[in-house]
Image (tube, helix red, strand yellow):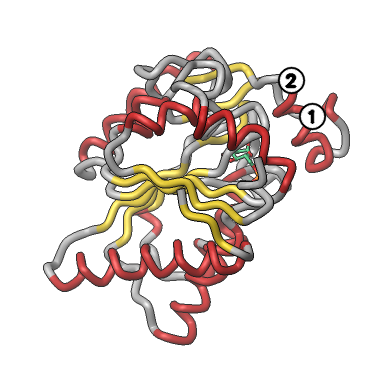
Amino acid sequence: VLIFEKPSEMSHRVARRIANLIEERQAVGQELVLGLPTGSTPIGVYQELVRMHQEEGLDFSNVVTFNLDEYYPMDPESLQSYHRFMEENFFNHVNIPESQIHIPEGDIPREEVERHCIEYEHAIEKAGGIDLILLGIGRSGHVGFNEPGSSRQTRTRLIILDEITRKDAASDFFGEENVPQEAITMGVGTILDADEIILMATGEHKAPIVREAVEEEANRSVTASYLQDHPNASFYLDRAAAGE
Ligand code: GLP
């Protein structure tokens, strides 16, 4: 667990870690495979990476990305889509080739969702697995959209969103009744397969769930707690999120 005085310090540290990994891989002609989250927490990391690209020439051409999740159903053009979020906050401002970007598709017919999830897993495998995955944490303790009850073995799949998650998303959707009931998410097993995991949390509203994830025994009612058993997982917190 690393505790930072300010969220900006946390974001800069994470961005620096990513930049170092990108450059290490470039030096040996290899790709870097990243797992990426949405939400307000990682925005500072994306801003810092964009700054490094624009001001310091950080080159993203060897970066491959897999996003954690997407609402279902969800039109990629819609205001609340994670496709749109990623484009606006990150992909439109750096030079990751489009063919190297992967986000679960929220606009496919229901009968194709299962196949899409299997293909998503295959694409991760084909890329050689995820080197570093960044995570936020929901107030239900979810990572990605792995809501309470998700087992350690789960893979990419369609899940039903928890009530607290839909409440927290209500303002983005102009009312809880407009928040989708479901989402496609990487599984806990998919996340734990990454070589390195960084979970970020800021703000005192996250303090109770961070305490549970870090200090209670790993259990399926707080899926972030599964990270305790990973050999290379860190919680990056600001003082407020570490408050409990
Ligand atoms: C959503 C996302 C999660 C994210 C969480 C927290 O539920 N699916 O991946 O971690 O929100 O969001 P925020 O960072 O805005 O608190």
Give x and y (percent) for residue 165: 70, 28
Compute the Cα span from label 1 to label 2.
Answer: 6 Å
Q: Residues within 10 Å of mark 1 (few under 14, many from 20)?
A: some
SS assignment at label 2: helix
Residue, x 24% and y 41% (percent of image)? 129
Give x and y (percent) for residue 19: 36, 69
SS assignment at label 1: helix
Residue, x 19% and y 43% (percent of image)? 128
- Which residue corresponds to mark 2? 163
Instruction: Tell which of 137 and 155 is nearer to you.
Output: 137
The quadrant of the rendered image in which ligand 1 is seen is top right
Left or right: residue 191 compared with residue 87: left
Left or right: residue 72 compared with residue 132: right
Left or right: residue 72 compared with residue 130: right
Identify which amino acid the numbered label 2 is placed on.
Glu
Quadrant of the image containing the C terminus: top right
